[in-house]
Image (spheres, helix red, strand yellow):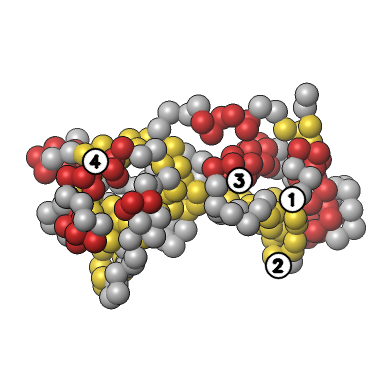
Amino acid sequence: MMQTVREHYPNLKLYSLSEKAITINFGDSISADLLTQITAVNQLVQEQPFPGMITTVPAYSTLTVYFDPLQVYKSTLDGWRCLDKVGNYILSLSLTDRQSTLNTIAPIIIPTCYGGSYGPDLEAVAAMHHLSSEAVISIHSAAAYIVYMIGFVPGFAYLGGMDKILASPRKATPRAAVPAGSVGIAGEQTGVYPLDTPGGWQIIGRTPLSMFDTDRTQPSLLKAGDRVQFKPITTSQFKQYQLT
């Protein structure tokens, strides 16, 4: 049975982030269930934009929708204030079976060369958890990850789903420069640096893939809701990837 967003998620909380943005709060936790809800509503809004909509930004537990307030105010959307017009519109959209799509899409494989100069913190992370480097690689590459949000720098995907046994603190002193493609760990999250940038995550490997490229139709390789798996590769394979 088809339901509206309002009927399917009666506990959603909407508030005005600014005169140009509205935020929908789905809960107060980090979970795959909340991500599924956020992804479903985000897809609906993207596919059925309202007059004046500019963009959407999904996060761990929220979806923020940016818009042109003048266009929204002049529209025939139901309500008086922009908050009401946009909120009523989103809550009135009808949900289909999108809730199941998150678990059926094929994972994006991230080839990763672990350790050595590509993963200078691998041995330290292993020692921190009384594991061998091989065990860290095996645990990290065995997990199925989900992209919860993009942030920090363009294309940086925050991935949830890492085995808690690898949860590690950020470095006490961040590096001034972390190479693009570096695979890091911070807390119970893992992620890939898309650009050369300062960073404090524990670096355990590097991928030859370009995570962010402005020449692509979709510059960021990953987006919220994507599933990701890491595939260990050798140094030779890393260099071969760079040649293709």
**Distance between the alpha carbons at the discs numbered 2 and 4:** 45 Å
Secondary structure at badge 3 equals helix
Q: Earlier in the sequence, mark 2 or mark 3?
A: 2
Residue type at mark 2 is Ser
- Of the two numbered discs 2 and 4 in the rendering, the one whose residue sits closer to the viewer: 4
Disc 1 residue type (three-letter): Leu
Residue 127 point in image, percent of width and height: 19, 59
Where residue 143 sits, quadrant-wise, is top left
Q: Report the mark closest to the observer, 3 or 4.
A: 4
- Name the mark on residue 18: 2
Q: Is there CB contact under 8 Å for labels 1 and 3? A: no
Label 1: element kind: loop
How far apart are labels 4 and 1 at the CA level? Answer: 39 Å
The residue shown at (70%, 28%) is 96
Q: Which mark is residue 12?
A: 1
Q: Quadrant of the C terminus?
A: top left
Residue drawn at x 64%, y 41% is: 37
Is tag 1's residue or tag 3's residue first in the polypeptide sequence? 1
Q: Amino acid at mark 4?
A: Ser
